[in-house]
Image: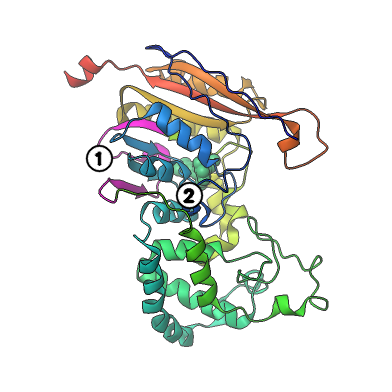
Amino acid sequence: MASSPTFPTIEASAHRPALLTCNWSGSALKIETTLHQLSPYIGKLKSSIAGSLISQFTQVGDVVYDPFSGSGTVALEAWAAGRNVLANDLSPYAALLTRAKLFPYRSLEDALNDIERLSGEADQEQGDIDLRSVPAWVRQFFHTETLRETLAWTRVLKRRRRWFMLAALLGILHHQRPGFLSFPSSHTVPYLRVKAFPRAKFPDLYEYRSLRDRLEAKVKRAFRRVPELDFNLDRRCFLKSAHLLTPEATVDAIVTSPPYMRQLDYARDNRLRLWFLGIDDHRSLDRKISPREDAFLKLMRQCFIKWKTILRPQKYCVLVIGDASRQVEDGNLPEIISRIATHEVGGYSHVHDYTETIPNERRVRRGLTGSTSETIVILRNNASRAKSTA
Ligand SMILES: C[S@@+](CC[C@H](N)C(=O)[O-])C[C@H]1O[C@@H](n2cnc3c(N)ncnc32)[C@H](O)[C@@H]1O
């Protein structure tokens, strides 16, 4: 059995907040709100980590900002904990998921009624779909009629600005399970699994899959476990590069995981879902949202400059950096990020680094020795309250 990592409690003081002593090990899937499971996202932060950072570094009523919101984990945890939320991501798929989680239907009944309302329009829309304009790499994932329905529903949901429903639809786009729309393929990153499930042996997996019943089932799964949410709290979503976004008002905390975690290709890994959102060149998008080392460090520098003007004095900037042991050219990544904030840009103090060691038993690839880790860098905006209000 995997041994649970222990979390040291750090003494709280004016300069050093106490990190919650909590156990982030194991899966959060059975306890988190099922809204988190609306659609997969590579590089998603564990909701239990996001939740404890929110309760540790922010207070009820605060404005929490996640400039690299991905699938909206921090955003949803913050909202569910009674915070106002500002969220941003440059990927249209990520921005859609974040928006969906911050603006869900108020009840399952509302969502199911909306499917009923929209289905006539989606049926009509099918007549206008010309599958010849769909690229072959997309067509190979679907039965022709399933693809036609999926395109029709996508158009209607976009036109009607039903972002939650569109996210739910993308959440059932590909997998080999019966509740999904594609031929057998993987769930997170779109790869057909025709070798594992050859058509001759599994003909039923290649038949037409009707959309509406699957979408209803998906929405029911999403509403299985929903916390009490205060719809009066302020929630805003943006689709910008983080270093360019200037919100209307200042924020009480920045809690985020920047795009360096494991050198992921956020657009390539989501290329099929992005295609349905109108992005047919995932490589160009990856040049913007999946920066390599130099571009990443430059982006962080620009963000720290911008965030000084956004983050209230003496408030925290909490960065989940990923594997601290990974070396970048000039040393260790958390150290480099702290140095950029505190020395190159200035105006921040480094409060603490926190590392969770993930034992080998929990790693996805078995048989590897050693352990990996998740490092959280905590910075504070040094500006004095008196000066900022003067
Ligand atoms: C590590 S992921 C965030 C994951 C998120 N915490 C979650 O739980 O899903 C980093 C995100 O940064 C986004 N990103 C990359 N470059 C960006 C930029 N310049 N501005 C805004 N977002 C960016 C990527 O699209 C990606 O979703």
Q: According to the image, label 1 marks what residue?
A: 248
Disc 2 designates what residue?
33
Above/below status of 220 relative to 15: below
Q: Which residues are magenta?
A: 231-254
Q: Position of residue 263 (x, y in %)?
A: 63, 39
* Residue 160: percent from left, percent from top: 35, 70
User: What is the distance, in whole Å, between disc 1 and disc 2 at their CAs?
Assistant: 30 Å
Label 2 element class: loop
Is 214 above or below relative to 356?
A: below
Q: Amino acid at mark 2?
A: Thr
Q: Name which quarter of the figure residue 370 lies in.
A: top right
Q: Is residue 323 above or below residue 154?
A: above
Respond yes or no on whether mark 2 lies under 8 Å from ligand 1. Answer: no
Q: Is residue 110 left or right of residue 333?
A: left
Q: Quadrant of residue 294?
A: top right
Classify mark 1: residues with Cα within 10 Å, few (<14), some (14-19) or many (20+).
Answer: few
Q: As shown in the figure, which amino acid type bears the numbered disc 1?
A: Glu
Q: Is residue 166 left or right of residue 188?
A: left
Q: Residue at x 39, y 25 (%)?
A: 316
Are circles 1 and 2 on residues that touch, CB within 8 Å? no
Q: Earlier in the sequence, mark 1 or mark 2?
A: 2
Residue 222 in magenta?
no
